[in-house]
Image (spheres, coloured by chain):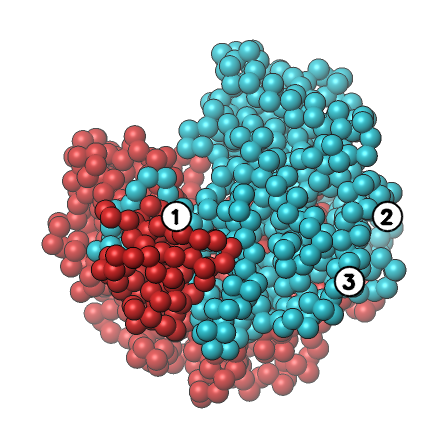
Chain colours: A red, B cyan
Amino acid sequence: MDTAALWQRYEDWLYYHEGLGLYLDVSRMRFDSELLETLKPKFAQAFKDMEALEQGAIANPDENRMVGHYWLRTPELAPTQELRTEIAQGIEQIETFAQQIHSGAIHPPEAPKFTDILSIGIGGSALGPQFVASALAPDHPPLEIHFIDNTDPAGIDRVLTKIKNRLKSTLVLDTSKSGGTPEPRNGMLEVKQAYESQGLNFARYAVATTMEGSKLDQLAKAEGWLAQFPMYDWVGGRTSELSAVGLLPAALQGIDIRAMLAGAREMDLATRIQDIPNNPAALLALSWYYSGDGQGKKDMVILPYKDSLLLFSRYLQQLIMESLGKEKDLDGNIVHQGIAVYGNKGSTDQHAYVQQLREGVPNFFATFIEVLEDRSGSSIEVQPGITSGDYLAGFLEGTRQALYENQRDSITLTIPQVNARTVGALIALYERAVGFYASLVNINAYHQPGVEAGKKAAASLLNLQTQVMAVLKEVNTPLDIATLAAKAGASEQVEAVYKILRHLEANDRGIIFYGDRSKPSSLQVSATSV
Amino acid sequence: MDTAALWQRYEDWLYYHEGLGLYLDVSRMRFDSELLETLKPKFAQAFKDMEALEQGAIANPDENRMVGHYWLRTPELAPTQELRTEIAQGIEQIETFAQQIHSGAIHPPEAPKFTDILSIGIGGSALGPQFVASALAPDHPPLEIHFIDNTDPAGIDRVLTKIKNRLKSTLVLDTSKSGGTPEPRNGMLEVKQAYESQGLNFARYAVATTMEGSKLDQLAKAEGWLAQFPMYDWVGGRTSELSAVGLLPAALQGIDIRAMLAGAREMDLATRIQDIPNNPAALLALSWYYSGDGQGKKDMVILPYKDSLLLFSRYLQQLIMESLGKEKDLDGNIVHQGIAVYGNKGSTDQHAYVQQLREGVPNFFATFIEVLEDRSGSSIEVQPGITSGDYLAGFLEGTRQALYENQRDSITLTIPQVNARTVGALIALYERAVGFYASLVNINAYHQPGVEAGKKAAASLLNLQTQVMAVLKEVNTPLDIATLAAKAGASEQVEAVYKILRHLEANDRGIIFYGDRSKPSSLQVSATSV
């Protein structure tokens, strides 16, 4: 395509949202107008699905749930008055609580104010708050946030050691929808132990964000925790950033949550327009569909050219892959859907894997995210007339051009600056794009059977550990692993038994190995006489 | 495959390194022994190539350079006595310098000791040090490290604001091989400006790590910087962690660099063995080749189940994709090689994209990294007989099993703990695996033409910016963008001119737009009369 035609294509497809100052450019996705025609019936269905979802249809049939994250920023859309009131009051409750924490009206027993937040949560309860903290937290936030987002003991220790001296002024936000997810439960128990070892009453520092009636809800009530905030069964973890899950830590860090909600609301309005070229979420879904042939044949590489958006790629990785990565479509056919997502930030990544994007396997399309404002305040010149920010802009455009010349497609999303409003809009934009794409390929974007299966698999291995240890304590002589597995009723799980024992042995948990470690079947195992 | 056969396959393929306590399990890559036979001739060549490389052959023909990162931990292998001495002295110089900084023998003009490190570098000069800092830095390091790894003005401001009050005791490590890479050069100029704005003489805080004779070398000498450390033309950025690039910041943070080198040396010894099943790097290369058919058809997902290894995935993303992502093979054929790499950490990622890995597009293979030691010290029980670490282990094994049952391949790498020695070994293991794989697919793993091209593309856009601004200042009436581009001799770059102007306008850089922003061709542009 010659330059003039390309410039025309750029303008023809350019989407601009005046209120947000946001541009979306899909001109470097090499689809033609025919695709638009072909997909119109699918999009008509997608728009209809989305309307039904926003009106409270059971959009997650597996779990018999409504899907209502759009109501969080437009409560008047919620299907009942009760929900509308609950959402509006929830936001007020967060603001009031944050003010009380900031002013010291609510303070820890032994300090005039809380100084730090320790956030315990995983998946949607971690990635949203982590992304928003790194994108939006002020340089000197009223409370500094730390995250425990795993069940890694060394990782937990590292965070606790870092804030050890400030534990007595650290507010714990424990976020778990069901209260039954092991990682946050373990994290909470470890943290509680840390408070108690300093003689602090954990309940006076702890806040629960969870569903009413959950195990965590019951515990928090029984122990009299400092406060509780609601999670709803109609908000999934990966779309919970604009619920209490994300808004509470944001407000505590001094981030303008009303602006986040307003940005999302504006984007929701824009993405309700049932006209593909005038709907940025539809343009994204169209581009994704084109690139991977509706089958995820190409990876999505996310390249924000802005340090504060580094975690946006990880946030999107969860939102997109957990929503779209499904075995079956809505009719029960095996489809193995999904789109792989990865990326960090530009221009940094140009000195890492962009070498491969430019020259190597053409198995991806890129999404550039451009931020027009370089910094607040003026810049020095690093050479006559040129600033560091000009370089950043030049690297983005240069890479975009080079990819195009090498037949690698890209999308470019441009925002005026990184602020609460644009971040809210970005979140809403991708939530809607994922919803549309799911309709185009006929899958349920709102469940995650693989995650549930993962929890069950781990639980069964922990049962196996208990059984194996019981057998081992009963017998007095060393056993080989296959025999031990058989005695534990787990002949089918010899290798897993070996792994369990190897892990216990490495942690001085009452296991001794005899034999050649390079030949597991030769090993004899016994329990130490503890 | 039934359980007994699988257990046998596990043992048959299990690699164990006794000295390092490291296991590599490729039993869940579903290749058969035939593949091993088929690839033996290619591996014979790979072993030969590697031998030649270690003996100082020109292994990077494009740049007419030797490739000597293996010499860094085994100086006696270097091809000349001069190099051997230089390497050994380099390590001593780093240790001496770190001791002098720690003791205060070298201290900043206005403080008794340096308290912080500000590391400026990009690509290999950032990812290695970042990975090692997060994996190995002690809880209370003698100096705390901060990174500027981009030319993002807001990102630079954020780091500088954070350490503003300690700038007078902050040591700057400026790392740039050529000294001509724009991002570290811009970062250095911005940082220098910050020191000067506090009335501090930058040279008294600045250390250069660069090649002799580079622009940075000349600058550091002319300004009398605090110290200089060498980079070698035979060490590429992505394999420079065990040169001064990585060892200097590591030593300053109190990390045992001799142990890192020792771990790498042990792994190098193990990966020189010319027998595939007894060489862990060969087993990795074999597995990668199998999975992607020698054409990168599957993505490599890296899943370390340990918080401190979070950045290992990003480190490997650079090492693998920049080394393998090439357009041409060594004979000049167009091959578009590479392997896409992504991942963060388990079990956290199980609550994000592992849903897709389990159920969705089967376009990947996984690499689990298991760390046997849960933490230093004992654990509380989160339920009878079960610790947080048991959960972590259970999640890993459960996911591995589930992937296998769903015909998704995986590799499992097990280390006893995360320490300087095992981290050194991991780095060396993957460096060698990349080298072998490059031989198998006949590409040059040691150059990065796409990165150089990226620098040139940006430079050309900055020239365009200068031209456009010159034209705009000369004319007195507003112009449309196409006319302006033509006057600047850039009719082929209308869109780029528009992007440049939009960026300048957003930063109050003397540009005014009139017209409809949603239609760039309708815009009239003029320079403000500054």
Which quarter shows the C terminus of chain B?
Answer: top right
Residue B185 image-quadrant placement: top right
| SS type, badge 2 | helix
**What's the CA distance linking mark 2 and mark 1?**
47 Å
**Amino acid identity at mark 3:** Lys
Residue at 17% of width from left, 45% of height from top? A203
Q: Label 1, on which residue? A: A506
Residue at 76% of width from left, 17% of height from top? B222
**What's the CA distance linking mark 2 and mark 3?**
22 Å
Nearest the eye: B25 or A159: B25
Judge left or right: residue A65 versus residue A27: left
Q: Where is residue A104 drawn, in percent x and y?
A: 22, 35
Judge left or right: residue A260 versus residue B109: left
Q: Image height check: is A89 above or below B501? A: below
Q: Image height check: is B493 above or below B146? A: below
**Which mark sits nearer the N-terminus, 2 or 3?**
3
Give the residue at the far front of this rendering: A477
Q: Image height check: is B49 above or below B441? A: above
| SS type, badge 3 | helix
Q: Where is residue A330 drawn, in percent x and y?
A: 44, 84
- Disc 1 crowd, CA 10 A, few/some/many (<14, 14-19, 20+): some
Nearest the eye: B209 or A354: B209
Residue at 67% of width from left, 59% of height from top? B276
Residue A288 image-quadrant placement: bottom right
Q: Label 2, on which residue? A: B62
The label number, if any, that marks residue B42 in the structure image = 3
Residue at 13% of width from left, 49% of height from top? A224
Chain letter for mark 1, please: A
**Amino acid identity at mark 1:** Ala
Is residue B425 at least partly visible in the picture? yes
**Amino acid identity at mark 2:** Asp
Chain letter for mark 3, please: B
